[in-house]
Every structure is written in C-alpha cells, then in structure tokens.
Amino acid sequence: MEASQEHLKEEIARLRKEKNALIMAHYYTRPEIQEIADFIGDSLALARQAARTDAEIIVMCGVHFMGETAKILCPGKKVLVPDMEAGCSLADSCDPEEFAAFTAAHPNHTVISYVNTSAAVKAHTDIVVTSGNARKIIESLPADEKIIFGPDRNLGEYINSVCGRQMLLWNGACHVHERFSLEAIVKMKKEHPGSKILVHPECRKPLQLIADKVGSTAALLDFARTDEAQEYIVVTESGILFEMQRECPGKTFLPAPAEDSECQCNECDFMKLNTLEKVYKALLNESPEINVEPELAARALRPIERMLQLS
Ligand code: 13P
Ligand code: SF4
C-alpha cells in the first residue's frame, strides 16, 4: 500500500537531517516536490548551488543531466536522483560522437553547449551555458569569434538574433517546448487582452516573436514578480506555475496550450517522474546514485567551471 504523502514528507525530513542531505528541485517538478525541496531553481541556479553546498548527499529532483552536472562539480559527494529514467529529449538530440564529428569538421570554432547535454558532450565543449546566462556569456566573447552552439537550435537562433551573431547551430530541440501551438496562444491572447506572454527560448521563433518576455525559467519568474500586469500566458513547462503562483498570489498565470490539446503536452514527463515516494526511497537506500567516470568528469568540469566564472 502506498504510504501517505504526509508520512512520506516526515520521513524525508528525518532522513535529510540524519544524512546531511540537500534536496534540490527544478521548477518543472511536481508541486509536492518543490514544497519539500531545500532549494528550487533553474538549471543555472541548481548548478551554482551544487557547487557551493556543504551537504554530504545531494538529491537532484530534475533530470539526469542535472544530477550529472552536480556530480561533476562535487565528485566527493554522493549525488542521488529519484529516477534514473528521468532523461531529456534535448540532451538526447545530441549524440556525443556525432557532436564530436561536427566540431572536428569546423576547427577554429569555440564550442558552446547548453547545460542540457551529457557529460560526453560537455567534454567536447569549451564553455557550457544555460538559458539563464547564454546571452551574457556569448556577448562577452569577441564579436568576430567563430562559435558552434548546441544542442538547442531555438535558443541558438534566439541568441544569434539578439546578439547579432552567426553561430553554427546543432539541430536539436526539446519536445515539450517545440509543441506549443502559436494559433492556440494567439487565440488565448484575444480572450485575455490584458495578459502578457512569457516564452522560454527553447520554444520556436514565431512564439518568441509574440512574447512580451523571452527568458529562462528564473528570468520569467523575475519578470512576473516585478511587472505590473495581472495576467500572464506562460509558454514553458507548466510546473513553473506553482512557483509563479506562490510568489505572486494576486496574479493569474495561464498555462499555454500545446498543439495536441488532448494530452498534457505542456508537461515534461521526465521531470514528472520525480515523486515523493522515490525521493524517500533514494534517501533511504542512497540509490540510485549518479557516477561519472573520473577522466570524463575532469574534461566535462572545465567548461562548466568556465560558465560559473563568466556568469
Ligand atoms: P532552464 O532551467 O535553464 O530555464 O531550462 C529549462 C529546461 O528545459 C530545463 O530542462
Ligand atoms: Fe529536457 Fe525539455 Fe524536459 Fe527540460 S523540459 S528536461 S529540456 S525534455
């Protein structure tokens, strides 16, 4: 029989204290996971927090590459993920061998990779970025620097347009952010004329063009917190609505519809694999644990450290 949610929360609190563990969660996880997390953030904030924590165990409630990044930053700590199956379609759209061949075919290019990649892709990278710092980092490079950007073509195209760059783009994408329907969002805007449209840069260009704000999950949250509008159409994974509503209780946040209105297509199934039961079991059994082969971890660490220095 499934343990009650309240009992699970109490057990998680007990184990976390006993084992000096830090529970981290991405904004796309389920509300009950965000509620019990010690730290909630976007990909950038999660990496920064992992780099500075003195906890002995990190429980990363997000997806595999987030746990892997934490392990690379903290090789001496135990990094647990509640479900090893929590992958990422964007990271999967970039095969390390194909990416290595692509970079080898374009020598004299600085290789920039989005954090949504495997350790093997990071090992072929000069600087890692997240959606929260990509623009700042790319703007810090000389205007004539030749750049390869992977794997998200929508974020790459966005950076090219706002920074006036001509980065070579890898053709990858996130299945959740690609599925939002322009037509349905325009219709929603007509029904809510006072609303503002918040768009994650992993979405396709036509959606970016109708946005009042394009930004990472943390940037969209910041915008909603400080902006004067009362209503927002949120074009990113709908898990973010929990924190938006918590921080701005008087405002209305409408999840943008995806192309197929029959399914919850604005949800990332991978993120939703994180449940209270699995967090409890991970803490109890200290498993599943992320491990990265030390030589690979050392090569993947350099571009992550460069990111942290530059942002
Ligand atoms: P950020 O956390 O950088 O906004 O990225 C969103 C995302 O898709 C994470 O997987
Ligand atoms: Fe990956 Fe997209 Fe899910 Fe983020 S929302 S974890 S990019 S599949």
Image (cartoon, rainbow, N blue to C red):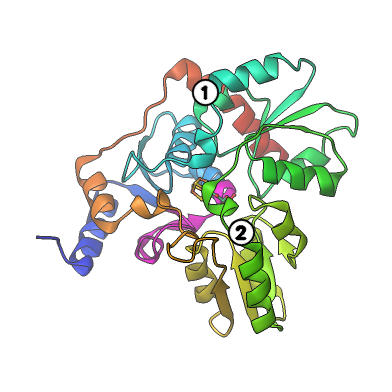
Q: Residue at x 88, y 32 (%)?
A: 142
User: Does the Cβ of the disc 2 residue fall within 8 Å of ligand 1?
Assistant: yes
Q: Is residue 308 above or below residue 194?
A: above
Q: Residue at x 71, y 83 (%)?
A: 193
Percent across and percent down for residue 231 are 63, 80
Q: Residue at x 78, y 22 (%)?
A: 109
Q: Amino acid at mark 1?
A: Ala
Percent across and percent down for residue 128 are 64, 34
Q: Nearer the viewer, residue 101 or 239?
A: 101
Examine the structure image and report whether residue 30 is included in the region drawn in magenta.
yes
Disc 1 secondary structure class: helix
**Do the residues under discs 1 and 2 have CB atoms within 8 angstroms?**
no
Give the quarter of the image for residue 229: bottom right
- Which segment is the magenta one? 24-45
Relative to residue 299, is residue 139 drawn left or right? Answer: right
CA gap between label 1 and label 2 equals 27 Å
Percent across and percent down for residue 158 are 76, 48
Percent across and percent down for residue 216 are 64, 55
Q: Nearer the viewer, mark 1 or mark 2?
A: 1
Q: Is residue 222 visible in this depiction of the protein?
A: no
Q: Amino acid at mark 2?
A: Ala
Q: Nearer the viewer, residue 101 or 19?
A: 101
Q: Which residue carries the number 2 mark?
A: 218
Quadrant of the frame with the N terminus: bottom left
Residue 120 circle label: 1
